[in-house]
Structure formats: C-alpha cells, structure tokens
Image (cartoon, rainbow, N blue to C red):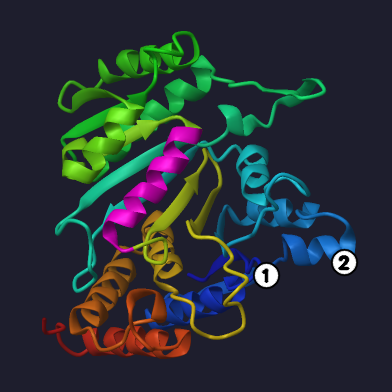
Amino acid sequence: MTYTITLIPGDGIGPEVCEATKRVIEAADVPVKWEVHEAGAAVAEKRGMTLPPEVLESIRRNKVALKGPIGTPIGKGFKSVNVTLRQELDLYANVRPVRSLPGVEPRFEGTDFHIVRENTEDLYAGLELMMMPGVAQGVKLITDRCSTRVCEYAFEYAQQQNRKRVTVVHKANIMKLTDGLFLECFRRVSAKYPAIEAAEIIVDACAMQMVKNANKLDVIVTQNLYGDILSDLGAGLVGGLGIVPGANIGKKEAVFEAVHGSAPDIAGRGIANPTALIQSGVMMLHHLGETDAADAITRAVTHVYQQGSVRTADLGGTATTTQFTDAVCKALEATKIAPLAK
C-alpha cells in the first residue's frame, strides 16, 4: 500500500533534513505520497499565522506527519508551533529514545534509555499573566486525566520495548499538589503492571543519575517541563541533538520530529546532520508497521557511523548533508544483497 503522510518542512535547516529523510525512506522501498504543508515563521510572514488550519486538517486526515524543526522567538513573538500542534491534536506522549551510535564520542558507551514526557499541560499550557508591573505569573497545570494516560502509555511502551523498569521523575517534595498528583497517578497506574518495576526519583537527583548511569532509569516518565530539559541532557550524553529522534503520540494522530532547533545560522549551507530526523522517520515506520524497512534503515545508519569516514561537521567530519544521505542510501542498497559487515 502507499502511505499518505503529511510533511511539514519547517524553518532553517528543516527543508534540508526533510529532503534527506524522504530520500532514505524511498531507498528503503516504502511507498509514500507526501502531502507538503508549510508552518512556522516563513508562512507567518505571508499569511499572518504560523499554523494554517489546513496543516491540522491534513494531519487529522492522514493520521501521521513528519515535521522538520520550527523556530520559536524567545520572550516575544508567536506561540510555539510545536506546542500548538501537540495541544490541538492532543499528542499527549512525547517519546525520545536516547541511544549511543557507534563511533560517536558519547559521554558513556552503550547508553540506551527512553524518555516519555507528558506533552499537553504543565507550565507549557501557556497560562501566564502579568499580576502587576514587574510581577509575572505562570500556572503549572497538572490533571489526573493527562497524568494517568501518559503513565499508562509509559508502561505499555516499556512492555513493547521489553524494558524492565519505569521511573517517574518529579519534584513532589516541594510541589506537593501538582507534582504530588502526578506521582499519585503513577503509583496507581504502576499497580496494574506488576511485571515492570516502578521507581521514583526527584528531578534534580535524576539529572545526576543520568550522567552517572542513565540506563538504570530505563524508561523515564515525567511532566512536560522536566521532560523537555532532561531530553536535551540525554542527547548530550550520546553526541548531541543532531542524532536523537522524537515522536509525539496521540490517540488518533502521531507527529514525528527531530528534537533539535532550526539552526538558521547554517541553513542553506548543506552541512546539517539529518540523522535525528532520519531516526525519527524510523520511529514513524515502526508506527506504521513497516518494521523491516525501519530495521534496514537503522542498520544502514549504524553501518555509516561504524565506518566513520562520512561525518557531518557537528560530529567532527566534513561531509555535507547530501554526502551523508548518499552513504546511508548506499548502505541500504547493500543490505538488499547481503548483510552489512561491521
């Protein structure tokens, strides 16, 4: 069958890494019709809106989207397109696998853990107001409904990935009502999964544990803000944001994206690392049930990194985006003939 997938190229380097990912998925012989829609700063200049309604309509119709990075102004300007997408489509679970790649200089060899982040509320709900001049307030919104469902997702995900432990990250010793509610929901859900160990850790202790032995955490489930910060820390453990994938999962729709920014300083120069979005594409293919193709791309990417001769500048190499993509596609073609040699 041919899949119709919404493609949002995004800003900055987004179109470049999206094109690379499209090429790799095509090389894996997955038939895809891409329905391209613009969102972000560029479309805002033309139409006065960052997320046109037809983008949401397309994702609702197709159920699956691949999205390039979209920049968000700091302290002013438009609301984050990423946050709006997650809220409008109720993409309540943000999933970020954190794994070492061979040949990349990680902080620790063999890092392999997962972060499941609640994606729709917490301080990211955007409930802010100026109480008076010089006094701003933000509301930390935590609900039983959203906390329960993301914890349930984390335990189901752990089962699917053959993981042994789910660790909840919180600050309930200080925020006794909000984080206390999240922790209460986790404990209630964990009782339904006796075969999976349930662990609890305070967020600052979690940050320390991540740089000592992150694998001990196994699958992390946490609130929106903590998850956002810890995800970037996790990326730093394995080589940076250029290689770590991400997915936003809802009951009906799913949007797959790289976790890095739009990098406007290198946009158009052809040197962006497309690995993160390629690996997000792998997550998308697993979601669609295209397991063989997903595994083939994973082997091809792993092979390129094992060989070590084709690296983009962020990892100390000189390869262009196109050259790296060519190497992955060539490795994919080789897998159709014989297994790749290490």
Along the line of sight, which residue is nearer the eye, 139 or 94?
139
Q: Residue furthest toward the top?
A: 177
Residue at the image position 77 percent from the left and 67 percent from the top: 42
Badge 1 element: strand
Q: What secondary structure predominates along the stretch shown in magenta? A: helix
Query: Which amino acid, by three-letter code, is at mark 1?
Result: Val
What segment is highlighted magenta in the picture? 225-239
Q: Residue furthest toward the left?
A: 342
Along the line of sight, which residue is nearer the eye, 55 or 83?
83
Residue 231 among those drawn in magenta:
yes
Residue 301 at x, y = what percent? 29, 75
Rendered image: mark on residue 36: 1
Residue 299 at x, y = what percent? 23, 74
Residue 91 at x, y = what percent? 55, 40
Rendered image: mark on residue 196: none
Q: Is residue 153 above or below residue 255?
A: above
Query: Which amino acid, by three-letter code, is at mark 2?
Result: Lys
Residue at the image position 52 percent from the left and 71 percent from the top: 2
Residue at the image position 88 percent from the left and 57 percent from the top: 48
**Residue at image mark 2:** 46
Q: For this view, does 106 lie left or right of residue 56? A: left
Q: Residue furthest toward the front?
A: 134
Q: For this view, does 127 lie left or right of residue 122? A: right
Residue at the image position 16 percent from the left and 43 percent from the top: 213
Q: CA distance from mark 2 to mark 1?
A: 17 Å
Q: Residue 237 is drawn in which quadrant?
A: bottom left
Residue 280 among those drawn in magenta:
no
Badge 2 element: helix
Residue 286 in sight in this render: yes
Total marks drawn? 2
Tell us which disc is closer to us: 2 or 1.
2
Q: Is residue 88 above or below residue 306?
A: above
